[in-house]
Image: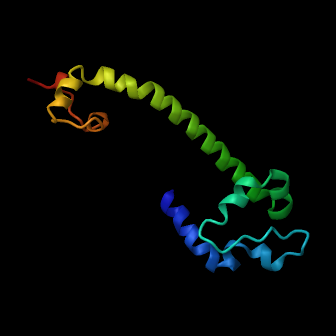
Amino acid sequence: MVLITLAFSAMRPRNNIVYAPKVKYADEKHAPPRIGKGLFEWVKPVMRSKEPLILEKTGMDAAIFLRFTRMLRNIFLALSIIAIAVLLPANVIGSNRSFISSNLEGSQSFFVTMTPQYPDPSKSGS
């Protein structure tokens, strides 16, 4: 997602015909506000625009797309907070009871124990 955003930010200023066709071809009533040529100049107008303005200037597709991406952002944020608050402590407490002693020896990093490939010593075959 980060690479797509960076690619869009790099290509948008040079390709107005693709990324902002209504600026050139629409009348004053339906033309969206002009956005600067900077790399991330588009972020602030998108975040601050209200839905009725987006609907009037750019159409139903853009309004629905922005509503959908905001919803996904909010769901992801809420689930991330829950996951960090609940799953991280449960993983640390339940996965390896001797975590502190093994970490003091320098044998495993804290984040290595949270990967799926980390072998749990209590479940080894020996």
Instruction: Name which quarter of the figure residue 103 lies in.
Output: top left
- Front one among 74 and 123: 74
Look at 79% across and 79% down and name the residue there: 24
Name the residue furthest left: 126
Name the residue furthest front: 104
Q: Is residue 12 left or right of residue 33?
A: left
Instruction: Name which quarter of the figure residue 76 lies in.
Output: top right
Look at 72% across and 48% down and name the residue there: 67
Look at 32% across and 25% down and name the residue there: 92
Q: Is residue 1 left or right of residue 38?
A: left
**What is the image's colouring?**
rainbow
Q: Is residue 112 above or below residue 9?
A: above
Expressed as whole percent of the image width and height from the top left, the position of residue 105 reads: 14, 31
Expressed as whole percent of the image width and height from the top left, the position of residue 10 reads: 55, 72
Q: Is residue 9 left or right of residue 97?
A: right
- Front one among 49 and 24: 49
Instruction: Name which quarter of the figure residue 58 lies in.
Output: bottom right
Look at 73% across and 60% down and name the residue there: 45
Where is the C terminus found, in terms of image quarters? top left
Total numbered labels: 0
Expressed as whole percent of the image width and height from the top left, the position of residue 84 reads: 46, 31
Q: Is residue 7 above or below residue 93?
A: below
Expressed as whole percent of the image width and height from the top left, the position of residue 51 reads: 80, 51
Q: Is residue 117 above or below residue 12?
A: above
Q: Is residue 54 left or right of residue 27?
A: left
